[in-house]
Image (cartoon, coloured by chain):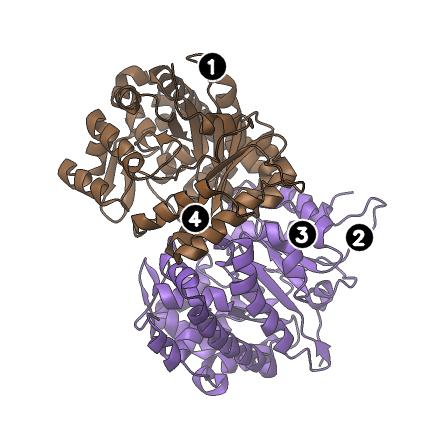
Chain colours: A brown, B purple
């Protein structure tokens, strides 16, 4: 299979690239007027996710506007617990909710293994359709939420401030939580492998809430499960390596541990200097992200300066280019951002560091 | 002035102590039935804060129950912006709000210097009354929110998820934000010095939201202002040093920078191992906190184990005791915690590490 733009996949393997690849977390999203139009026509966010033609359509929108180096499947991390029977729904302005949150051992015992080709067929259809539409222009990234992050929503019943329910279970009945995490992990693994078989060329695991844990609890309850998933993932498909990136928000203190999972890339938030991250784990993994999404509120010149600052961390002292960098924001782009600012950023990254 | 229990003040100066001091963030709070009773009688949280007799009463409640080594003034960090004219109010279940949030340069220009002895007289009265009632048993900690943290509420108009308004100002009009932070800092400094004159024997600055910044922005917009406040604080009162502790949540990556402000102590959340924090800054500052507040959901034995783990980080290889440790949680105690669990923790800390 021909792939016109290999930069993203090469960077993740720390191989030379023609240019530093860039994509934007939530690049298909509310900041784009063309997305808001499709979203309004669909009537709901879940309809968008569950209709392959619409999911494909919005996945492609940012690529039609910007010269990006990867597409990412349009979906939601909570489709997996939804398929497990928890009943996902959204309340406007309040975020995701579950009709049947996990409250007891009985609830955990009831959960079973899901066949992603049946219960999540709409995701696989979206992957297949998007791959076809992309026509080999850029690679398609598949993704899932980490078991820990999915489980926070499954136990709290939605978004949370203190995560007191899941932490209460973690400290008062750790075995039950491990039993739940194990089931979720098996489903996430099957889900990601199905995405790969359907055509996803790289995988991201989003661990939005691992950073609320102690170092030991992060290892036990979040990282170990991501590690197992990485071990079980299909390594090569269509004769190409399928690289995996882990993103844990607020995990700057734990980069060494994350790098030990055998992941190809680590997604960084903005609380760490890229140069420090390179010094600590740059010889083991590709580094992605790091720009504060709010920086896109800044004047154009400042955006360009910040892009150059991050890029320059990958210029060696002798002026040569260090490999293993994927440019991205440190978290999803805010809905209020002017799309023109993304254009400024993409141009700055493609232009590279002024010498 | 006689002080029966010097452990807290000594530990902050990394001097020998008779026992590792312990106090609990939000020790006067909703987890205590006797607090909930006074709170219900007062009718509102703000009435509690603004009535010196009631504030004093709830400040003393945890000390009557537990063998704690310090009292902390009962108040709210948002009394300062309230005194600056922003109109603080609370909506049940939604947290704090301001009637007049800062939205423009005009709003910033209007803000002036507050005389804490007039506009915040109720706080000073509470400090004086509490000191009298404590009768030299344990020291009284005064506190304020950091300028950055207060300013997030002042601009967002209350609690926030993405902090997009203040970040928008920070990246699009940094000068205006500095002007605002400067005014808030002057008021915080005057407020803390008034607390010291009224009898506060140590100061804590709570920077709840500094951790949402990039390393550079944390230095510029949060830490520099705390640094200036430390420089302006009364150093000695009643012939005793008045030690200062800085607490920034999610600042484990930046401990070295924080230690450089000349603070006496650093408050840690639970995302860093205490032994790592000691290795990095233990020769410069006292370390406080670190236990995940959710650990108080655990069985008693687990609570004791965790206390011992943190305490043992301060035992040198030759078995001698390292100074400079104040035991605490890494954030405020949850309202759902059973007070008996606090008893278990306090006992474990006073018993020390099993040898």
| Circle 2 residues within 10 Å: few <14, some 14–19, many ≥20 | some
Disc 3 target residue: B349
**Is A152 on the left or on the right of B99, as rendered?**
right
Asked if labels 4 and 1 touch by Cβ distance under 8 angstroms, the answer is no
Q: Chain of mark 1?
A: A
Closer to the eye: label 4 or 3: 4
* A340 shown above or below A234: below
Q: Chain of mark 3?
A: B
Checking the image for residue A236, the label placed there is 1
Query: In 3D space, how far apart are the residues under numbered discs 1 and 3 (Cα atoms)?
Result: 53 Å
Q: Quadrant of residue B284?
A: bottom right
From the top left corner, tell me how far across and down residue A45 is, in percent: 22, 37
Disc 4 target residue: A162
Locate the N terminus of chain A by quadrant: top left
At numbered mark 3, what does the secondary structure look like: helix, strand or loop?
Answer: helix
Which residue, as the protein is rendered here, is positioned at the far top? A239
Closer to the eye: label 1 or 3: 1
Query: In 3D space, how far apart are the residues under numbered discs 2 and 1 (Cα atoms)?
Result: 54 Å
Disc 2 target residue: B321
């Amino acid at each position: 299979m021909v792939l016109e733009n290999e930069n993203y996949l090469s960077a993740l393997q720390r191989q030379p690239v023609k240019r530093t690849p860039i994509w934007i977390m939530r690049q298909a999203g509310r900041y784009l007027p063309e997305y808001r139009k499709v979203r309004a026509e669909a009537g709901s966010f879940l309809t968008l996710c569950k209709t392959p033609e619409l999911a494909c359509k919005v996945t492609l929108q940012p690529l039609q506007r910007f010269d990006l180096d990867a597409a990412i499947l349009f979906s939601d991390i909570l489709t997996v617990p939804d398929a497990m029977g928890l009943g996902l729904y959204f309340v406007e302005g309040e975020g995701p909710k579950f009709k049947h949150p996990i409250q007891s051992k009985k609830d955990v015992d009831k959960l079973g293994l899901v066949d992603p080709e049946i219960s999540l067929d709409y995701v696989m259809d979206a992957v297949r359709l998007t791959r076809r539409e992309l026509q080999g222009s850029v690679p398609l990234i598949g993704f899932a939420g980490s078991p820990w992050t999915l489980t926070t929503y499954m136990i709290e019943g939605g978004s949370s401030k203190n995560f007191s329910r899941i932490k209460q279970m973690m400290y008062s009945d750790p075995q039950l939580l491990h039993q739940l995490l194990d089931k979720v992990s098996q489903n996430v693994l099957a889900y990601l492998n199905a995405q790969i078989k359907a055509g996803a060329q790289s995988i991201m695991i989003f661990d939005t809430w691992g950073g609320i844990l102690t170092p030991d609890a992060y290892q036990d309850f979040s990282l170990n499960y991501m590690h197992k998933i990485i071990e079980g993932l299909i390594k090569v498909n269509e004769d190409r390596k399928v690289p995996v990136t882990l993103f844990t928000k607020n995990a700057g203190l734990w980069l060494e541990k994350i790098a030990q999972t055998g992941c190809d890339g680590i997604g960084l938030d903005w609380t760490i200097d890229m140069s420090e991250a390179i010094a600590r784990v740059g010889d083991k993994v590709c580094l992605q992200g790091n720009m504060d999404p709010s920086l896109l509120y800044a004047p154009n010149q400042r955006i360009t300066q910040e892009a150059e600052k991050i890029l320059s961390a990958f210029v060696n002292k002798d002026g040569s280019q260090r490999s293993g960098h994927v440019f991205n924001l440190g978290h999803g782009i805010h809905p209020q951002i002017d799309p023109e600012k993304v254009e400024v950023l993409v141009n700055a990254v493609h232009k590279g560091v002024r010498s």
